[in-house]
Amino acid sequence: MNQELLYRASALCAGSEHCCHDIQEKLKRWGASEEECNEIIDYLVDEKYIDEERFSKAYAKDKLRFNHWGRQKIDQGLRLLQICTAFRQQALSELPEQEYLDILKGILQSKQRGVKGRNNYERRGKLIRFALGRGFEMASILQCLPEDLKEDEGDYPDEDRSATYSDF
């Protein structure tokens, strides 16, 4: 086992949380062979430098608090880092629900100030698409939409609600 690579990897893991995939990519960039990568990662896991359960929880909390990502986008990020399903689900279930909704309300209110549209229907659609792109679920988005953009009866463009199918 290459002691220099082991030292570099252990120093990196001691400073912040990393997953096996991250360390394997770094080791490859540093010139380690596949066999060396596996040996070093096994050592780091045995010595608790790498713990994917701990990593997934930290990743989920950080992405929610600092990047304002929703559960779906966090899950996608963890999947790309090859974290197992059980750890992903556990990390997502441990996100505080009230903090999650408060962050969603905050980004929707902030985005609402800059959203332009001919009517509330268009502005509402743009806000919903924005929040969906951030990885939030539709049910949470509808719950957190600003009151002035909640669905109105007469707010749909170019639609005559008095028409029936027999009129066509």
Image (spheres, rainbow, N blue to C red):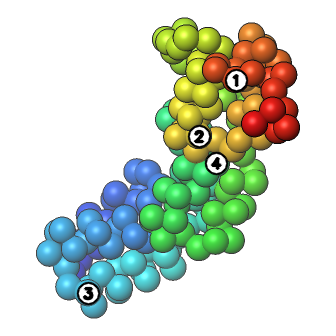
Query: Label 3 belongs to which residue?
Result: 34
Q: Position of residue 1 (x, y in %)?
A: 25, 86
Query: In this picture, is 42 found above or below 86?
Result: below
Q: Residue at image x 64%, y 48%? A: 71
4 or 1: tag closer to the N-terminus: 4
- Secondary structure beneath dot 4 equals helix
Disc 2 marks a residue whose amino acid type is Leu
Query: Image quadrant of residue 87?
Result: bottom right
Mark 4–mark 2 Cα distance, whole angstroms, equals: 10 Å
Q: CA distance from mark 3 to mark 2?
A: 39 Å
Q: Is residue 104 left or right of residue 62?
A: right
The amino acid at mark 4 is: Arg
Q: Quadrant of residue 106?
A: top right
Residue 9: mark in rendering: none
**Extreme-left residue of the structure:** 31
Q: Do residues under tags 4 and 3 come within 8 Å of each other at their CB atoms? A: no
Looking at the picture, which amino acid does disc 1 mark? Glu
| Residue 132 marker | 2
Considering the numbered disc 3 on the image, is that residue within a helix, a strand or a loop? helix
* Image disc number at residue 159: 1
Looking at the image, which residue is at 49% across and 56% down?
Answer: 77
Circle 4/circle 1 CB separation < 8 Å: no
Instruction: Give the Cα separation between the discs numbered 4 and 3.
Output: 33 Å
Q: Earlier in the sequence, mark 1 or mark 3?
A: 3
- Residue, disc 4: 71
